Image (cartoon, helix red, strand yellow):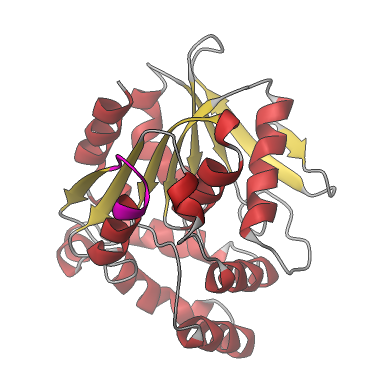
Amino acid sequence: MPTITADDGCPINVEVSGSDSAPALMLSNSLGTNLTMWDDQVGEWSKHFRVIRYDRRGHGGSGAPKGPYSMERFGRDVIAVLDALNVKKTNWCGLSMGGMVGQWLGANAPDRVEKLILSNTNSYYADKGPWNDRVKFVRENGLAKLVDPNMERWFTAGFREKSPDVIARMKALFLTTSLEGYVACCEAIRDMDFRDSNKRVTAPTLVIVGAQDPATPPAQGELIAQQIKGAKLASLDAAHISNMEQPKLYTETVLNFLS
């Protein structure tokens, strides 16, 4: 795994698979996970693309400098990775927070984006209270107290019952997240607003929603699809981490759009 240094000195952990001559597909994970959340997809996608996975700052093997962070900061980290890998233009698949970074890229770095997949995500939070509450809770109690409620948002009850091994892995993954990094990411999500900038996105876009997603309900994704001219919408029978709950269908849905 290469380590790429962002323009402010933060190390970004990156993993690349597939042929260097294939078109690029960059994957961006959700809040509180790392690049391994794409393990179910990377094997198939690597047959068609040069797949670039990375840990967002504050997560996994990347640095976790003191905040504040912003969506622009995350976007510039992505551009640093693309520049270091000599990738002029990439397809983008981001889930949850990864979809938020994708919206920033689509509007602010259109020359670097081929196609956009924005999955289980949102463009704006009118009510900042829940994010302020989460930041306060985590600072007072640590991440461990948030693990079980998080799994209930991330996966349906049926999936949690039949896939305890996946849930155990995701709990462990969540707890590897830097506390300071997590808080700074929460604050960046709280403060984002892509309602106007999404109208500038020209890349072909697919918005994926989870029909049972309580974290970013379908209406939020549907609104993004309305904001971006020509965007397509796909609904999967899943909660928030839809690529893990419906791995085969998710993999095929993305491939069908990109091809």
Q: Quick check: 116 left or right of 210?
A: right
Q: At 21% across and 36% down in the image, what residue appears? A: 248
Looking at the figure, which quarter contains the C terminus?
top left
Q: Position of residue 225 (x, y in %)?
A: 30, 51
Q: Position of residue 138 (x, y in %)?
A: 57, 83
Looking at the figure, which quarter contains the N terminus?
top right
45 relative to 32, above or below: above
Q: At 36% across and 78% down in the image, what residue appears? A: 149
The span shown in magenta is 226-231
Q: At 35% across and 50% down in the image, what residue appears? A: 119
Q: At 46% across and 79% down in the image, what residue appears? A: 146
Q: Position of residue 113 (x, y in %)?
A: 52, 32
Q: Nearer the viewer, residue 142 or 153?
A: 153
Q: Quick check: 122 left or right of 57?
A: left
196 relative to 107, above or below: below
Q: Position of residue 73 (x, y in %)?
A: 69, 54
Q: How many marks?
A: 0
Residue 98 visible, this angle: no
Give the image quarter of residue 182: bottom right
Residue 228 among magenta residues: yes
> Residue farthest to the right?
9
Main secondary structure found in the magenta portion: loop
Q: Nearer the viewer, residue 34 or 8?
A: 8
143 relative to 70, above or below: below
